Amino acid sequence: MDMLVLNTFTCAAEFTQVAAIEALQDSTNAVEAMVSEYRKRRDHFVAGLNRIPGFRCVPPDGAFYAWVNIEETGLPAEEVQTCLLEEAGVAGIAGAAFGPSGKNFLRFSLVSSRHVLEDALERMERVSLRWRAAIPH
């Protein structure tokens, strides 16, 4: 048993070594494809966020997250976060969780599929009726 434990913790299994070699030898196209796909998701999601009344979002340069200014909604970020979760089934994180300067922001992940992101945008748009009247025109 000691030999099994020793080999398990000191060496990567052969099949994982073979998989790693394969991934490293032909990863250029995969990485480019992944970056391209995330860029498309980001651009589409950020454009959709900017169509929601009271939301303003600048596309992130390298993160997998959208950082959305929600100050124009007139509501605290925690309230918008709760509303989106409970009424739209969309999870975001109030920006204050990342420090005091994030108090008027929400953070959303961009790593879901395009379909999931599109669905989230539609549901957030419907729920935005709750704060639209408070936004100055």
Image (cartoon, helix red, strand yellow):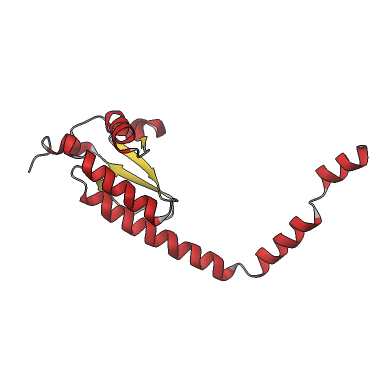
Quadrant in the rendering for residue 133: top left
Position of residue 79 relative to residue 64, above or below, is above
Extreme residue in the left direction: 137
130 left or right of 11 in image: left
Q: Which one is nearer the viewer's eye here, 115 or 96?
A: 115
Q: Quadrant of the N terminus?
A: top right
56 left or right of 45 in image: left
Q: Position of residue 84 (x, y in %)?
A: 30, 36
Position of residue 125 relative to residue 36, above or below, is above
Q: Position of residue 19 (x, y in %)?
A: 71, 61
Quadrant in the rendering for residue 59: bottom left
135 left or right of 107 in image: left
Q: Position of residue 97 (x, y in %)?
A: 40, 31
Quadrant in the rendering for residue 28: bottom right
Labels in figure, total? 0
Residue at position x 43%, y 59% in the image:
38
Q: Which one is nearer the viewer's eye here, 124 or 77?
A: 124
Q: Which one is nearer the viewer's eye here, 1 or 104?
A: 1
Q: Quadrant of the C terminus?
A: top left
Residue at position x 49%, y 62% in the image:
34
Residue at position x 92%, y 42% in the image:
3
Position of residue 11 relative to residue 102, above or below, is below
Q: Position of residue 30 (x, y in %)?
A: 55, 66
